[in-house]
Image (tube, rainbow, N blue to C red):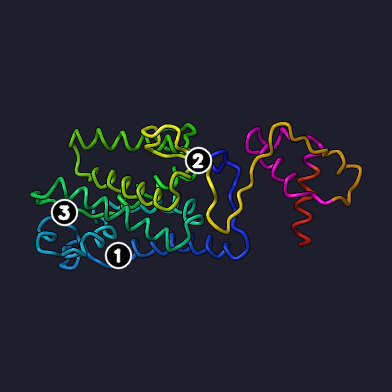
Amino acid sequence: MLSDRNYMSPQGGNSELAAGGVKAVFILIAINVAVFLLIPGDSWLYSELSMSTYGIKNLYLWQLVTAMFLHSKVRIMHLLFNMWGLYLFGTIVAPVLGAKRFITLYFISGVCGNLLWMLFNWDSPAVLVGASGALFGIMLATAMLYPDKEFIMIFLPVPMKTKTLVIVYAVIEVFSELSMQDNIAHLAHLGGFLGAYVYIKFLFGRNVPWDLFGFLIPGTKKPFTAPPGWTLHQQPPPEANDNFEEHLRNPDQKVTQRELDMILDKISHTGINSLSEAEMGILKKAREQMRKN
């Protein structure tokens, strides 16, 4: 399963799908940065593109989309945090989704976040800007597809799995919204979560490695299946025992994909220092094979 690490890689032409997904991440970052630099915070255009109850009541519906490309001019960390998160999580999940589906995820998450915030602030004079809803949606999508990938947070310097990170953020957002002690649109974050959840479930159904609400429907999880055109390298069963010593006796013997997968999985679990002399030799031989090809 994808959640067991192993790794997923594109076959044939789908390397273009992966490259297009990563390109989409950088395009979205570039648009956000360009808007921040080119549109003054006190301008008429900034006001027209920001989302407000006044604007929505007057059918300025474009604000649901444009607001997610604006950021506070007095809080540059707002932009930097969002763009760093978009890069960090986007470059993980975008290669799997491809450009079209990743951009769709971005917009669905952002718009759902804006709508949820608007629902609870219909009579408020507040204005909403920021890509946080979209970012939190991308975070959840990453957790659903790569739940056991580990991160180390600056404020909590211990390894944390993606699914744990998302749950922690969600709990923080709920309590922050209840406390109402800041001007951060926490509801937009939660709306981004919900929008992304529905979209990823639409794409993969019950075949996601981790389902945020899976505990509500026990016994329905199915093994994850990779998207069409992708290959999923599985870890061999524990009883599998390839004769790596044969490579030492026969230098011309080629390293198989299965043998390489087993060694890479061992490195990911116990570190490179755990490899035997034969396994180190196979790793070196595999590098040489790739150079020749």
Question: Foreground mark, 3 or 2?
Answer: 2
Say what secondary structure mark 3 lies in. strand
As measured in the structure, the alpha-carbon distance from the residue carrying label 1 to the one carrying label 3 is 17 Å
Query: Alpha carbon of mark 1 to alpha carbon of mark 2: how far?
Result: 43 Å
Residue 152 lies, with reference to residue 119, above or below; the image says above
Residue kind at label 3, given as amino acid type: Val
Query: Considering the numbered disc 2 on the image, is that residue within a helix, a strand or a loop?
Result: loop
Position of 217 with respect to 55 (left or right) is right
Q: Which residues are magenta?
A: 254-280
Q: What's the mark number on residue 35?
A: 1
* Three-letter code, disc 1: Val
Residue 268, magenta (yes or no): yes
Q: Secondary structure at mark 1?
A: helix
Percent across and percent down for residue 101 are: 42, 59
Q: Which residue is mark 2?
A: 222
Classify the position of the N terminus by image quarter: top right
Report whether residue 85 is seen.
Answer: no
Residue 159 vs residue 64, the one in the foreground: 64
- Note whether 246 is above or below 106 in the view shown: above
Q: Position of residue 118 (x, y in %)?
A: 17, 50
Q: Which residue is mark 3?
A: 127
Residue 56 on the magenta span: no
Residue neighbourhood size for the residue with mark 3, other residues' Cα within 10 Å, grouped as few (<14), some (14–19), many (≥20): some
Task: Name the image quarter holding residue 166.
Answer: top left
